[in-house]
Image (tube, helix red, strand yellow):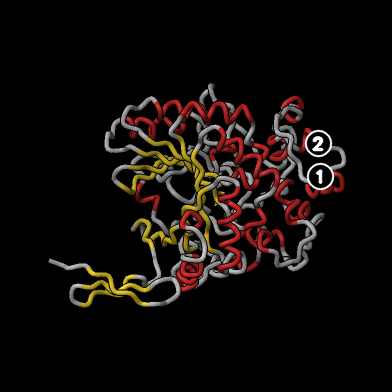
């Protein structure tokens, strides 16, 4: 199951995890991950009419309260094709087992997110982004399992140190929904459980011993799928380090499991300011009454919200869709931050657009909507070169003492800028 050496950021498979851990087993064959009390406990109350209709049809035994419990959502996720076929036409996939075994990236969709896919056309954007397809079996030139070479940049387990002043903390391999284009498909869900607190100690020590590190991005997997006390252990351990100024959490949870944003979680997160959340957003249809409530809670607590979007062919690769997504994000108080070119993981060619498409999208937004709505379009350079921003050619060069500029309408202007 694990194809890279353990020191290369892999979870400590088979090790005796410490007694302070509450290891969230997420094996789909285990129906008793959480206690009955936990499944009935939530302070999240928003449920849209569409989601409620879906609940009544496919989970008639679940109360609204249970549906609104993030633990119930995880425990009742769609994690195999048989269950998924109850709500979606997956008849085009004629060999489920083959697909499941040949891919390292598993299938997992929360009932809430499944309710967004239900009743939509086969080629619906969100369906493409989370339902496995046979196209994933086609490996194209230039694709590799760890395209950013993050495994080569791990000074200790579960930590990537690529830039001088910041590190990426790989806190867990678990996600509540698996995106078919995931850059970290080589590491997510190796053990069907969270790594646990003991597995983080060397990474925390590394940060403590490196005063140049002022910014820690907690990612994975999805950190917000962990229990509150695990998240708090990590945040408090990092906040205790004097030179760590900024904490960031990369997550898709508010989009796919908004019920996770409980008042209790938010109250805890609020203690660790300045705290930034980078939200993985894919499509405007992800902004629902449930996600709006999640973002309201986070923003009201003073947590800074930014978005990250992967540019995906047939999912969000148009000026209209991207502009609509960015507008809706701003309305729920999330500032658009990055659009990423899709990384070349094996079997991802059906998702990748030409780079020209990304530039076309930025060009189609700049000048036509406010700057707040326009993210940076970047390529994460293969092999670990870091993020490279790409812009349309607004700067056209120099003519003597003038800089030649092209505006959003394609008109040319000369700006006096003596070089001496
Ligand atoms: S939520 Fe993030 S880490 Fe998890 S599968 Fe999607 S892209 Fe990968």
Q: Quadrant of the rendered structure where residue 37 is?
A: top right
Marks 2 and 1 in Cβ contact (< 8 Å)? yes
Q: Please tell me whether residue 181 is drawn above or below residue 154 in the rendered image.
A: below
Instruction: Residue at 74% x, 68% y: name it.
Output: 92
- First of labels 2, 1 by sequence position: 1
Measured as percent of width and height from the top left, residue 1 is found at 55, 49
Determine the CA span between mark 2 and mark 1.
Answer: 8 Å
Residue 220 appearing in the image: no
Q: Please tell me whether residue 371 is drawn above or below residue 91 in the rendered image.
A: above
Q: Quadrant of the rendered structure where residue 417 is?
A: bottom left
Residue 346 appearing in the image: yes
Q: Nearer the viewer, residue 319 or 60?
A: 319
Image label count:
2
Instruction: Residue at 16% x, 67% y: name it.
Output: 419
Within 10 Å of disc 2 (Cα), the crowding (few <14, some 14-19, many 20+) is: some
**Is disc 1 placed on a helix, strand or loop?**
helix
**Is disc 2 placed on a helix, strand or loop?**
helix
Instruction: Residue at 56% x, 62% y: name it.
Output: 323
Q: Residue at the top extreme?
A: 19
Measured as percent of width and height from the top left, residue 144 is found at 46, 62
Q: Is residue 326 left or right of residue 386?
A: right
From the image, tell me which residue sits under label 1.
52
Measured as percent of width and height from the top left, residue 239 is found at 40, 28
Instruction: Residue at 81% x, 44% y: name it.
Output: 52
Measured as percent of width and height from the top left, residue 351 is found at 56, 67
Mark 1: C-beta under 8 Å from nearest atom of ligand 1: no
From the image, tell me which residue sits under label 2.
64
Q: Nearer the viewer, residue 146 or 352?
A: 352
Within 10 Å of disc 1 (Cα), the crowding (few <14, some 14-19, many 20+) is: some
């Amino acid at each position: 199951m694990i194809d890279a050496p353990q020191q290369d950021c892999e979870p400590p498979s088979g090790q005796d995890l410490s007694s302070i851990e509450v290891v969230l087993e997420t094996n789909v064959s285990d129906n008793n991950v959480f206690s009955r009390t936990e499944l009935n406990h939530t302070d999240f109350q928003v449920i849209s009419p569409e989601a409620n209709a879906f609940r009544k049809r496919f989970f008639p035994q679940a109360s609204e309260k249970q549906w609104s419990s993030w633990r119930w959502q995880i425990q009742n996720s769609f994690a195999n094709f048989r269950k998924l076929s109850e709500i979606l036409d997956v008849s085009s996939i004629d060999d489920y087992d083959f697909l499941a075994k040949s891919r390292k990236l598993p299938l997992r969709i929360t009932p809430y997110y499944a309710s967004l896919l239900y009743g939509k056309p086969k080629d619906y954007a969100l369906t493409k982004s989370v339902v496995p397809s046979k196209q994933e079996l086609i490996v194209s030139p230039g694709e590799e399992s760890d395209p950013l070479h993050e495994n080569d940049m791990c000074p200790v387990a579960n930590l990537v140190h690529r830039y001088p002043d910041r590190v990426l903390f790989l806190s867990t391999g678990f996600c509540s929904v698996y995106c078919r284009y995931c850059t970290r498909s080589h590491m997510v869900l190796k053990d069907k459980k969270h790594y646990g607190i003991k597995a983080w100690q060397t990474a925390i020590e590394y940060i403590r011993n490196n005063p140049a590190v002022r910014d820690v991005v907690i990612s994975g997997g999805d950190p917000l799928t962990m229990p509150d006390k695990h998240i708090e252990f990590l945040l408090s351990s990092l906040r205790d380090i004097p030179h760590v100024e900024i904490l960031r959490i990369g997550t898709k949870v508010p989009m796919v499991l908004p019920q996770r944003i409980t008042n209790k979680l938010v109250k805890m997160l609020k203690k660790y300011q300045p705290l930034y959340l980078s939200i993985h957003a894919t499509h405007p249809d992800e902004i629902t009454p449930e996600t709006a409530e999640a973002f309201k809670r986070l923003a009201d607590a003073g947590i800074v919200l930014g978005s990250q979007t992967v540019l995906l062919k047939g999912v969000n690769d148009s000026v209209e869709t991207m502009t609509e997504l960015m507008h809706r994000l701003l309305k729920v108080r999330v500032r658009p931050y990055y659009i990423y070119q899709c990384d070349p993981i094996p079997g991802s060619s059906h998702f990748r657009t030409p780079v020209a498409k990304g530039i076309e999208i930025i060009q189609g937004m700049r000048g036509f909507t406010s700057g707040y709505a326009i993210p940076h379009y970047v390529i994460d350079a293969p092999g670990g070169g870091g993020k490279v921003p790409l812009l349309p050619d607004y700067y056209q060069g120099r003519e003597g003492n003038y800089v030649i500029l092209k505006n959003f309408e394609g008109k040319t202007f000369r700006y006096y800028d003596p070089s001496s």
